[in-house]
Amino acid sequence: MRRICILLLMLLAAAGCSRHKPIHSENDLPGARIGILTASAHRPALEANYPGATLKSYEDLPSMCLALRGHKIDAFFCLGAGLDALLAGNPGFEELPVRTLRDSVAVAFPLSGGALRDSLDAFLELIREDGRLAEMDENWFGPEATRTFYHGHTHSGKPLRVGIEVGQSGLTVMEGGEETGFEPELMRRFGDHLGRPVHFVEMTGPGMVPALLSGRVDALIDAITPTPKRETSVIFSHPYYRDELHLVVLAAGRGKHRVHQPLWSSVRENLFEDGHAILILKGLWYTLVIMLCSVLLGGLLGALLCWMKLYGPPGCKRFAHFYGEFIESIPIVVLLLFMFYVVFAATTVAAVIVAIITYSLHFAAGSCECFVNGLEGVPHGQYEAGKALGFTEWETLRYVALPQAARQILLLFKGKCVALIENTSIVGFIAIQDLTKVTDIIRTQTYNSLIPLLIVGLLYFLLAKLIGFGVDKLGDHLLKK
């Protein structure tokens, strides 16, 4: 065991001592660690152009910026959209000229959405001819971009639901709690063309295609590059944006001239500017609603499962035992995606309701075990004594067993509640802007990971302490009675 620990420490030390490889020209890329977006369709071309390079996938631009700043990678590729803002927000980064690798992105539709796709193609051709597409490009990109927000017009037709991800490529940003940028403006103008209101559904990359295929959204716009493999599952519009891949590296001498942003300035930028505080409060509200409702409903269902397991007929006992083993053996993220994209795919049930149902079902299995373990910890003689006093089975449970099991039950129950708070951090997969998702949105705007993660970590810590305090107070009150 001692040798294993020493070996692990040596491996960690070796990993920590890995040196950043300076990139001065394209000739330095073979053998380097290069970051690309997870959904990038250019991996084969990059592997062919730079043999020996290690390609590492990241979910968004802020994650790649953080990795480059921390020397986890030596460079990363990205679209030119928003590159000026990226470089301005990351002092010490610079663009390095490389061979041309062109990219074009398009809007994705389900296979049944051919009519809507054709309408968008005709609209793209129209605004390309009359110059509106070029005006949009000048408005959002380049050093002299004004970035004027386009609100669109008010319509009463059937909403056009568009799946979108803020900050993944630089084509979409969040300002004042609203999606804005090149992609949102394009879809708002398309909605005006159709006479339909546009509803953006902010989601995470892995959940976008399932949402499209299940009918949760009508289209996806997220800097998606059409490929033959992708065209077997979805159909694409004509490209709405064409660009080249750009390489970002650490500037020479950055270690000697590192620019540090003052702490208070960083806190103000991440917490108080552009409506970030409102976003955080909304994320906190969603987290609290999902957690409290799930604890209430899951606790009641768990009590029912406990009764079935201990006192129910054989069929109920078998069902309760199977339910607990089945639910707790499935990762909560898998259960959440299954409920949202399969069970409730063809319904209009809100994502928050689906999350509450999912977490209630999952919490019921855990709370059932809390009740069962607590009641089984009461000596069997106590049940016999209750029956000898003339109590019924229910009265024995209520007046004899439960008071003795309450302390053990509440101790276990508190741990399950805290675990539930932590598990709610994945609801962003089904387009809910909870605390964690809001943190991702802020990171995509400020290219700062430290302050948003510290804020959300502190909030989760306070929530866990608050829930623990509440359960302890409830336990003291019940035990006194």
Image (cartoon, rainbow, N blue to C red):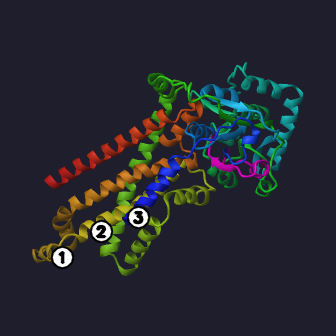
Q: Tag count in the figure?
A: 3
Which residue corresponds to the image point at 69% horizontal and 26% vertical from the top-left? 84
- Of the image marks 1 and 3, the number of the one nearer the N terminus: 3
Is residue 38 shown in magenta?
yes
In the drawing, does residue 441 fall left or right of residue 300?
right
Which residue is pictured at 61% across the width and 40% down the height? 64
| Residue under label 1 | 380
- Position of 444 with respect to 398 (left or right) is right
Q: Which residue is mark 3?
A: 3
Comparing 15 with 442, the one in front is 15
**Residue 135 shown in magenta:** no
Q: Which residues are magenta?
A: 36-60
Name the kind of residue labelled 1 in the image. Answer: His
Q: Secondary structure at mark 1?
A: helix
Considering only order in the chain, which callout, 2 or 3, is on the residue closer to the N terminus?
A: 3
Whole-number angstrom distance, CA of label 1 to CA of label 3? 48 Å
Quadrant containing the N terminus in the rendered view: bottom left
In this view, the residue farthest toward the bottom is: 314
Q: Are marks 1 and 3 in contact (CB under 8 Å)?
A: no
Alpha carbon distance from label 1 to label 2: 14 Å
**Residue 182: % across, % down:** 72, 31
Q: Identify the element where label 3 is drawn.
A: helix
- Mark 2 Cα shell of 10 Å, populated few (<14), some (14-19), many (≥20): some
The amino acid type, in three-letter code, at marker 3 is: Arg
Which residue is tagged 2?
372
Seen in the picture, residue 253 relative to 419 is either above or below; the reply is above
User: Would residue 225 appear left or right of 201 to someone viewing this image?
Assistant: right
Question: Sequence order check: which comes first, mark 1 or mark 2?
Answer: 2
Q: Mark 3 to mark 2: distance in Å?
A: 42 Å
- Residue 350 visible: no
- Which kind of residue does numbered mark 2 sit on? Val
* SS label for mark 2: helix
